[in-house]
Amino acid sequence: MSSSTLVDVVIPVYNEEEALEHSIATLSAFLEANCPYRWRIVIADNASTDRTPEIGRRLAEQSERVDYIRLEQKGRGRALRYAWSHSSADVLSYMDVDLSTDLSCFMPLIEPLANGRHGVAIGSRLAPGAKVKRGLKREVISRIYNLMIRVLFPRKRFTDAQCGFKAITQNAARELLPLVKDQAWFFDSELLLKAEARGYRIHEVPVKWVDDPGTRVKIVKTAWEDIKGLLRVRFGG
């Protein structure tokens, strides 16, 4: 791909009035300075009830490189599915609004997709070379979950299903998105499992990642939903 390649960076948000404006400004400045491709930031708001819609619309009005879309139902997977499905970009990516993953990892994430070497790429907090700062509870749950994936899917090769830092080509998205059923947090895992089942080699980038202590993710509940999703994919199709 050339400099005409378009890269979408989707930011799924739910009630992020405090973080949104600063994060979009930080991300925009980084992409302006470091991304050689055409790029666009897409704020995917899934049913926020605070000032997130107001802020998102204002940011989109202020910059031609920022779009805002609104979904009336919650679910990160639902937001990503909608944003990616309605995009014309060559490379589709997403990252969490808290920017827990260091932005220096972004170009290594998308370059193999922009160059046509891979169809799917992920950031990994468990790959050799990753530098991670997070609490013991999240560390233990994450490692147990990824161990369960390895047990249930012995042929899987990716190391970290849950890191909120992923990218996919337009062609891969067209093939894989219709196969993914989950609309919430298991969306990522299911996408990767379906990708490997169809022969995609998943490019992994060891990331620098710092836990956000103010995250709204309910860790235990999310982990349980993910486990149920693994059992569905493994035994129910």
Image: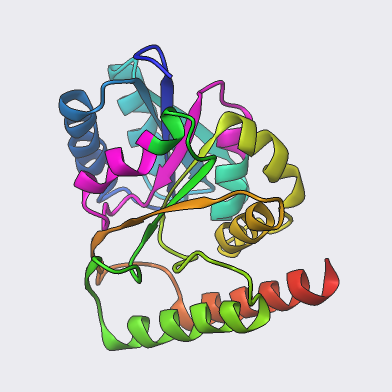
Q: In the rendered view of the protein, which quadrant contains the N terminus?
A: top left
User: Where's residue 187, x and y in %?
Assistant: 60, 58
Coloring applied to the structure? rainbow
Q: Nearer the viewer, residue 119 or 143?
A: 119
The quarter holding residue 123 reads bottom left
Outermost top residue: 4
Is 2 positioned to the left or the right of 148 in the image?
Answer: left
Residue 74 visible to an observer of this rendering: no
Residue 203 visible to an observer of this rendering: yes
The quarter holding residue 61 reads top left
Q: Residue at x 33, y 26 (%)?
A: 58
User: Where's residue 237, x and y in %?
Assistant: 83, 66
User: Where's residue 23, x and y in %?
Assistant: 24, 43
Q: How many marks?
A: 0
Q: Nearer the viewer, residue 195 or 15?
A: 195
Outermost right residue: 236
Q: Is residue 204 above or below residue 3?
A: below
The quarter holding residue 110 reads top left
- From which residue to which does the magenta span run? 82-111
User: Where's residue 73, x and y in %?
Assistant: 63, 49
Q: Nearer the viewer, residue 25 or 7?
A: 7
Q: Is residue 86 magenta?
A: yes
Q: Residue at x 68, y 59 (%)?
A: 182
Is 173 positioned to the left or the right of 121 in the image?
Answer: right
Q: Is residue 117 above or below residue 134?
A: above
Is 171 positioned to the left or the right of 40 in the image?
Answer: right
Q: Is residue 84 magenta?
A: yes
Q: Residue at x 66, y 75 (%)?
A: 153
